[in-house]
Image (cartoon, rainbow, N blue to C red):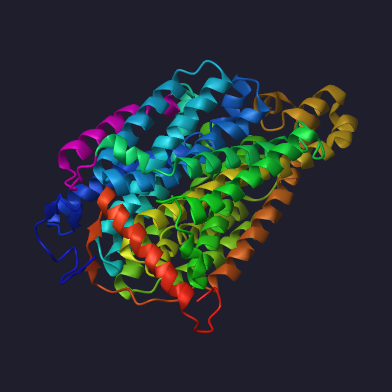
Amino acid sequence: MANADKTADEDRGAYDDKSKGLIAIVMTALAVMMLMIVDQLAVFLSALDTTIITTALPVIADHFHSSAGYTWVGSAYLLANAAATPLWGKLSDIFGRKPMLLFANVVFFVGSLVAALSNSIGMLIAARAVQGIGGAGLLTLVDIAISDLFSLRTRGTYLGIIGGVWAIAAAIGPVIGGALTQRVSWRWCFYINLPLDGLAFIVILFFLKLPTPRVPVIEGLRAIDWLGNIFVTGGTVMFLLGLQYGGVTHPWNSAIVLCLIIIGAFCLGIFILVEWRVATYPLMQLDVFKSRSNAAVLILTFLHGFTFIAAFYYLPLFFQVSRGASALLSGVYLLPAAIPTGLAAFATGAFIGITGNYLIPIYVGVTFMTLGFGLFIDLHADSSWAKIIIYQIIAGIGMGSLFQPPLVALQAGIKQRDIASNTATFNFLRLIAESISLVVGQVVFQNQMKSQTPYLISTIGPELAEQIGAHDAAASTSLIHSLQGMQKNVVERVFANSLRPAWIMYTAVAGLAIVAALFISRTVLTKDHEIAEVGLEAEKKHAADRKAERAARGNKSDGQGPWV
């Protein structure tokens, strides 16, 4: 690795030493513009597909008569997104960023097409998983490419732009999804991806100028940590399935729930062991956790992902059931949370670029996020619109402020050679937190609804109470909208009250993020920029360097603890 004398935005030209896979990152203004267009298209697609179905989920679940579908149509995308993220980071280290971006686009396109044509809930969930794999590549490789190209001080601005685009796409996603669901069909939530994905593919193919190392495909694939990938994917799926089934379709002490949770956790433990002791080129660099500041950043990222996704998934449910909103209106009602999220992401990126300080946005973010979700606890079926709007704005400012500043904080504390793998780890933890959050939130909500069954039986009758309170709470929006008078009022109140335990849980998690933020150190963001090395030979060199550094640390006795 070597330091460049100028920042990426000041230098001009580029070269590629193919024998070493060495990339000197120097760009013209036109190249920067084209790169950002490509990156924004890719991130827009990934983010849009995360939230576009939030307002359509009740309709989809009702269409297929599946309450489990409400959670798994959303979480299948996020789960696959998380599981594939570390693999995309390593693939890009070996084969280069551009080929993997193109491949990710193809995978995403195929998943979108199959989702649009689905004729069963199982087919739709599988297609969403394929979409999630492609979306993981789009999102992760964009962050990695920007980190390759710009200095720490400069990349804060560009990452802020990407974060803002993600948040804007997430903001308009529910509205677009609601409009398509109400005016055309929920299938158009997936058809809409096809022209956008095609455009992104063309722009990447012809305009993204990133050098690509010449690595034989078979040799490169052999270098992938497939054992670790199997354990992290299998462990995550089993663990989440156990959480999904527990207390809803099976008792918590049932054999299937206990086996899924225990074996899933065991597989995740094996994954850590594989990364630590077995893998030659691990998907996850565990050394990053030896720094107290870096560990705090990753914990904060997990807690942020766990919390913010709840607003985009459970507020639409609140609007559609407790406020009687249509799918389209529930997306509009979500804008007071979504728009501030996007604006805050833009603002924090600009702030970091100007001041070089990432701690202030982090402190602001965790404070506002905790306050906003705490206020959600006060939401009732008859809450005033002033409350609903103000609470969402406060939460949105907090959520948006925590997308990119933690990533800048993490990258400030690691070496350039580890940027790709640790950026993938950063995104992995956020995405796995989102997946777990949707399942846990659904469990808390559904169990609370189930506990209300005796009350519902006494007020609306046993048949409706059993259907709404015990089994199909999230998938019963059309049934609830058909109710009249006292019956409808009772169900609306029960739904809103059943969300309160979930909001309490999310507020507590957001409060833990405040604690994590206190352990993040401030590092000066320099304008020096290092050269990025990619390719199989570079991977071998990096592995040897890491091994030597670990040996040196093991032989050094300086009295320091494991966290420095």
Identify the residue at the far left of this view.
Answer: 13
The reply, left or right, for residue 515 in relation to residue 284 is right
Q: How many marks?
A: 0
The reply, left or right, for residue 35 in relation to residue 62 is left
User: Does the rendering let one see residue 315?
Assistant: no
Q: Position of residue 372 (x, y in %)?
A: 59, 59
Relative to 430, say whether 473 is above or below: above
The reply, left or right, for residue 351 in relation to residue 182 is left
**Residue nearest the observer in this picture, 295 or 441:** 295
Residue 158 picture quarter: bottom left
Which quadrant, please, contains the N terminus? Answer: bottom left
Question: Is 270 covered by the magenta stretch?
Answer: no
Residue 447 picture quarter: top right
Q: Which residues are magenta?
A: 188-215
Residue at image location 48% in from the left, 47% down from the top: 335
Question: Is 210 covered by the magenta stretch?
Answer: yes
**Residue nearest the observer in this picture, 41 or 111:** 111
Residue at image location 23% in from the left, 72% down from the top: 528
Magenta stretch, main secondary structure class = helix
User: Does the rendering let one see residue 387?
Assistant: yes
Residue at image location 72% in from the left, 32% down from the top: 473
Residue 525 picture quarter: bottom left
Residue at image location 57% in from the left, 25% down from the top: 60
Relative to 183, say whether 544 is above or below: below
Q: Position of residue 542 (x, y in %)?
A: 32, 59
Q: Position of residue 136 (x, y in %)?
A: 41, 42
Identify the residue at the far bottom of this view.
Answer: 559
Q: Position of residue 282 (x, y in %)?
A: 43, 51
